[in-house]
Amino acid sequence: MLELLQLALPMVVSQGAFAMMIFTDRYFMSQIDPAHMADAVILVSGGTLRGTGDTRWLMIASVSLHWAMLVAQFLIIIVFEFSPKVSWVAFVVMILVIAIVYTLRIKRGHWRDADVLERVMRE
């Protein structure tokens, strides 16, 4: 019996550790949701646009989109009295929209215009 226990115990501990590793990996990977990824895109693309001198457009777009988010949240929470889950989904959608708008601005290449680059270089 003692020999069986000596053989089985390391396997049981090993399987338990493996199961714990799988659980923690899945738990922590599930925390990386679209809102975190979109926030990273906003930080990088916003910094890119600021660095290239497209600050006026970035300010107008950011203020406009954040006011739209505020109005949407007011309607969802106060007017329609939806659940907090709906409010959270709307928040994530707005973060995704901001990331898409910033990315499209970079892709269109307005910041590569010679006048824009000349103005940045003068500063």
Image: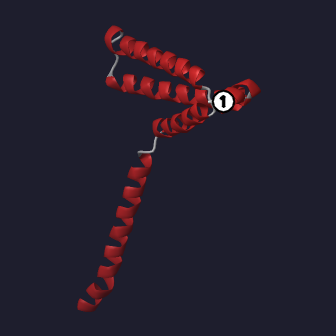
Residue 87, quarter of the rendered image: top left
For the point 35% across and 17% down, which residue is it?
Answer: 82
Residue at far front of view: 122
Look at the picture and state if 87 lies above or below 31.
above
Element type at mark 1:
helix
For the point 54% across and 17% down, which residue is it?
Answer: 60
Is residue 23 left or right of 108 when viewed as pictured?
left
* Residue 50 visible in the snapshot: yes
Counting from the top left corner in percent of width and height, residue 55 is at 57, 25
Is residue 110 left or right of 1 when viewed as pictured?
right
Tell me the quarter of the image containing the C terminus: top right
Residue 10, quarter of the rendered image: bottom left
Is residue 99 left or right of 117 when viewed as pictured?
left
Look at the picture and state if 7 lies above or below 40.
below
Residue at far left of view: 2
Look at the picture and state if 16 lies above or below 48.
below
For the point 55% across and 19% down, which residue is it?
Answer: 61
Counting from the top left corner in percent of width and height, residue 32 is at 45, 45
* Residue 1 visible in the snapshot: no
Residue at far bottom of view: 3
Counting from the top left corner in percent of width and height, residue 115 is at 73, 24
The residue nearer to you, when weighing 42 against 29, is: 42
The residue nearer to you, when weighing 38 against 78, is: 38
Circle 1 residue: 122
The three-letter code of the residue at mark 1 reads: Arg
Look at the picture and state if 32 lies above or below 112.
below
For the point 63% across and 33% down, which residue is it?
Answer: 52
The colour scheme of the drawn protein is secondary structure
The residue nearer to you, when weighing 66 against 119, is: 119
Residue at far right of view: 114
The residue nearer to you, when weighing 96 against 112, is: 112
Tell me the quarter of the image containing the N terminus: bottom left
